Image (cartoon, rainbow, N blue to C red):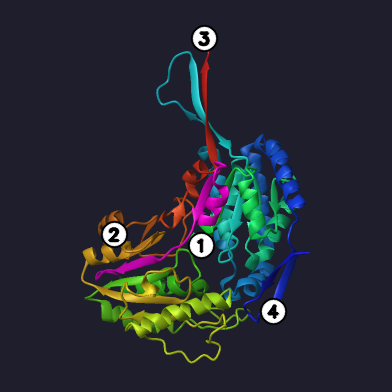
Amino acid sequence: METVKLKSPIDGSVYAERPVASDREIGAAVERARGAQVGWAQTSIAERGRIVLAMLDALLAMNDEIVTELAWQMGRPVRWGGEKGGVEERTRFMVSIAEKALAPVMASNPKPGFRRYVKKEPLGVVMVIAPWNYPYLTAVNTIVPALMAGSAVILKHAAQTLLVGERFARAFETAGLPKGVFQNLVMNHAQTEALLASGRIDHVNFTGSVAGGRAIEKAAAGTFMTLGLELGGKDPAYVLPDARMDHAIANLAEGAFFNSGQCCCGIERIYVHETVYDRFVEGFVAETKGWMLGDPREQATTMGPMAQPRFADFIREQKAEALRKGAIAHMNHRDGRDKAGSPYLPAEVLTNVDHQMSVMREESFGPIVGIMKVRGDEEAIALMNDSPYGLTASVWTSDVEHAAAIGDRVETGTVFMNRCDYLDPALVWTGVKDTGKGAGLSEIGYENLTRPKSYHLRETV
């Protein structure tokens, strides 16, 4: 029997192992989802919301166990308390706007004797292929609005966070969700591609690599299913002379190194105006020294191991290439765990970098950041746009209008001012270029998880 083994980054041991579903079991799950979705779509939005919020309560009640599991599964330090804050914020918000977001849209030009409106119909069966880096938050982004819109959901979670899907399933069972409306499946890549190619899935949301997104598109080709793809990122920050420097330094360091840098919208490159460059670098290096690498089960640890050794080795290769081309490394770590084949990787700050280096062009997805000096807005904007990705970008200044004007010219899905690495559920989550396609959360997220159906009803003849 084929199984999926979850190796913990803490010590390389097998933390969990689960059997891969058979093709017959997968087929049966899809049929259950299709059958259950019909009744779920006829359930009132208020009742759907009640059940989803009961699921949230059940999930929050498990949080102490979840926090420890996350440390074992993907290395998140227990001191950060898991993902309950974001999961609760996003779930409650999406439930609260569901009635309005899903309400029929009346024709803008009324005509006597006619009722004309557009209803927002559920898509049917929605598949969520979730990543390991924020395993609850990324999954909630689609699971909650898809269910609120009246679709059934099949979750295929990353092998690195196998237990997350089981937690969701348990929470939904506790909440009394009708059987078949949500199902967690353990599948291999070939089975996933075959299911997408079968035409039995109506929408897929995938968060992962660009290569993974291309594989999803290829598998779904010809089925005409809708897609939501959140792929790579290389998110920039621009620090202007009028920025509050202590605030920018502290927040950008957190944006770069939280979760060991394994954040879709984490800070990977920083451009600093030449008049404050030296001050910023000095402060940023000092701030980075406070990020302590260690065992994620210990409260003192602020940065745990990366999820897999190969991810850390990729960062080591990026750093080595940058140093060969003239970059300067500032941290000078002496950590015996920092060696090839180890997931334990200290935070690193590089200067004297340029866009000929991989670390400034290719997604790192780890605890390393390059800082470049710029002469002003024109150079900063050109460099921020010199990337195949566009998820978020942040501008650090005291001038709101100036920040918005810069944001208008940056190719990105979200523009931040004086903050970063945050997802606001009231705003749409989307990207441009190789970051992917589709949109999640906010009312626009509901538009992407429903299909329009027009009603043109003549009342008189």
Q: Mark 2 points at which residue?
A: 403
Observer-side mark, 1 or 4, equals 1
**Three-letter code, disc 2:** Ala
Res 239 seen here = yes
Q: Would residue 380 be found to the left or right of residue 332 on screen? A: left
Q: Position of residue 340 (x, y in %)?
A: 54, 85
Q: Would residue 254 be found to the left or right of residue 162 on screen? A: left
Residue in front for this viewpoint, 388 or 248: 388
Looking at marks 1 and 4 on the same chain, the residue that comes earlier in the sequence is marked by 4
Tell me: residue 25, above or below residue 233: above
Say which mark, if any, is on residue 209: 1
Q: In which quarter of the image is residue 178?
A: top right
Task: Label 4, secondary structure: give it.
Answer: loop
Q: Position of residue 182 (x, y in %)?
A: 69, 49
Q: In which quarter of the image is residue 433?
A: bottom left
Q: Mark 4 points at which residue?
A: 13
Res 103 seen here = no
- Which region of the structure is painted magenta? 214-243
Looking at marks 2 and 4 on the same chain, the residue that comes earlier in the sequence is marked by 4
Task: Label 2, secondary structure: give it.
Answer: helix
Say which mark, if any, is on residue 384: none
Q: How many labels does the image show?
A: 4
Looking at marks 2 and 3 on the same chain, the residue that comes earlier in the sequence is marked by 2
> Separation of disc 1 and disc 4 at Cα?
25 Å
